[in-house]
Image (cartoon, rainbow, N blue to C red):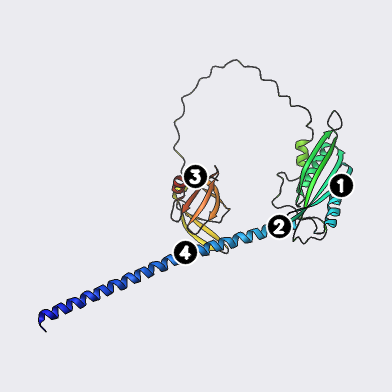
Amino acid sequence: MTQREKTLIIAIVTLGGLWFLWRGFDSYQQAYNDRVRDTERLQDELFDQQLEVRRGKQALRQLERYQSQSLPIDPDVARSDYSDWLKEAIQSSGLELGSVKWNATRPEGDAATALTFSANAAGSPEGVVRLLDAYHRLDSLHQLTNLQLRPTDEEGSRWAITLTSVALILEGAEREEGLPEEPIEPPRLRLATADEYVDSVVGRNLFTSYTPPPPPRPEKPKVVRRDPPPKPSPPPFDDAKHAQLTGIVETGAQLQAWIRIRTTGETLRLHAGDELEVGLLKGRVQAVLPREIVVESEEGVVWRAALGDKLRDARSKSAKPAA
């Protein structure tokens, strides 16, 4: 074999080896890319499943809350207990009881049974206010569907009241008798006591037409010396320009966002639903996702901040009207 033939064979073997190496690397790279895509897909699926689990737990807690507010599961017991409570509420408010009647029982789909009651009474405006206060403080699934107030004298010091109330029996409720006694949390009413509502309502004649006050007398124009407007003050310092979303971690069943405020050295740790206040930036965290947070500002504007973003920059570039 000549030297030329040896050189040709070596060249062919070398080229063949390089070709096989290139094909092997290409196959490895393709397999690696497939594994990366599969990993990302599985992570997304895992996040979606965890989100569904959290939503299911929230729905279960809400259902248990509703069941605790239900009337007794036996319709006859529920009808008797609610009628007794309505009579007691009317009389305790200082009103003269006319009557309390059960009108109808009807199913509300497969989830609940609705009981309709009507009542009438008479008394002072203070008694009416106290009755409505007691009604709305009861932590039960009931609602006024009709309320009629009629003055029985010219001064409006005595009213006749007629009301219709619908109360629910929820399927799966465990209550056998009585009505909920625990106070509502959070409270339905803004004021803490019935006395505060009495002070704000009693004394007004709600059945007379409104008479506006007389217009003020025109005043003679005054000569006012106006000083030149002051120079505008510099804009206030905004810590939100130096606050950065530095991390998102899982704490229990929730995701927690870490926001580092570099001007103060403080780190905020927030969950979905928490208030956000950094410098001039105020709002509420709507959601904490694996790679970003969703915030609704006080003005009703929804914006997003990704990991590494500064809050003020994210607010400026990703703002959009709230749905």
Quadrant position of the N terminus in the picture: bottom left
Which secondary structure lies at badge 1? strand
- Most distant residue in the bottom direction: 1
Q: Residues within 10 Å of mark 3 (few under 14, many from 20)?
A: some
Residue at the image position 51 percent from the left and 63 percent from the top:
45
In this rendering, is residue 248 above or below 26?
above
Mark on residue 41? Answer: 4
Residue 175 found in image quarter: bottom right
Viewer-nearest of labels 4 and 3? 4
Residue 38 found in image quarter: bottom left
Circle nearer the N terminus (3, 1):
1
**Which residue is denoted by mark 3 in the rendering?**
320
Q: CA distance from mark 3 to mark 2?
A: 35 Å
Q: Amino acid at mark 1?
A: Lys
Q: CA distance from mark 2 to mark 4?
A: 36 Å
Circle nearer the N terminus (1, 4):
4
Where is residue 180 drawn, in percent x and y? Answer: 78, 55
Viewer-nearest of labels 3 and 1? 1
Q: CA distance from mark 1 to mark 4?
A: 61 Å
In this rendering, is residue 53 above or below 224?
below
Residue at the image position 71 percent from the left and 57 percent from the top:
65
**Which residue is denoted by mark 1 in the rendering?**
101
Asked whether the residues under the numbered discs 4 and 3 touch, taking CB atoms below 8 Å apart as contact, a structural biologist would say: no
**Which residue is denoted by mark 2 in the rendering?**
65
Circle nearer the N terminus (2, 4):
4
Q: Amino acid at mark 2?
A: Arg
Where is residue 117 drawn, in percent x and y? Answer: 83, 47
Foreground of the two, 117 or 305: 117
Q: CA distance from mark 4 to mark 3?
A: 28 Å
In this rendering, is residue 3 above or below 211?
below
Foreground of the two, 280 or 21: 21
Where is residue 16 drawn, in percent x and y? Answer: 23, 75
